[in-house]
Amino acid sequence: MLPGSLITLRRKCGNAGCRCATGEPHETPALSYSVGGRTKMLTLRAEDVPAVAAAVARYRTAVKALEAEARAELAALLDAVAARRAGGRG
């Protein structure tokens, strides 16, 4: 599992005779992730992209499952507190 996003970096190298000088920038796949509130980039080789994409997808699936479980537990707690408050007076 990998946190972050798979992105494509597009840039010009600055060489006058390069294809990027005419508007076709160089493209490099990268993993964008956060460490201590700062965004980091890890450039990848083309053969690494499928494995990284799968790992990012697994991370997002796990986060969604954890958030769903937390929402369910919060709802149960709210119900228990409301029941206790409704039945405890008198």
Image: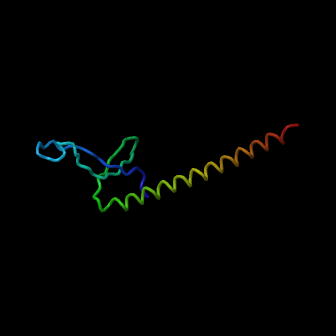
> In the rendering, at what x and y percent does residue 11 appear?
24, 44
Residue extending furthest toward the left: 17
Q: Residue furthest right?
A: 90
Q: Quadrant of residue 50?
A: bottom left
| Residue at horizontal 66 percent and vertical 50 percent from the top | 73
* Residue 22 at x, y percent in the picture: 18, 42
- Is residue 50 rendered to the left or right of residue 90? left
Image quarter where the C terminus lies is top right
> Which residue of the protein is positioned furthest toward the top in this rendering?
90
* Colouring style: rainbow
Instruction: Examine the rendered structure and indicate whether residue 3 appears above or below residue 78.
Output: below
The answer to whether 4 is drawn above or below residue 82 in the figure is: below
- Residue 66 lies, in percent from the top left, at 56, 53
Quadrant showing the N terminus: bottom left
Task: Give above or below for 75 relative to 65.
Answer: above
Q: In the visual, does 53 lie left or right of 68?
A: left
State left or right for residue 46 relative to residue 72. left
Residue at left offset 36%, top offset 43%: 39
Q: How many numbered marks appear?
A: 0
In this view, the residue in front, 80 or 27, is: 27
Q: In the image, what residue occupies the spot 56% across and 55% down? A: 65
Q: Which residue is at the far front?
A: 22
Q: Nearer the viewer, residue 62 or 83?
A: 62
Nearer-the-camera pick, 66 or 6: 6
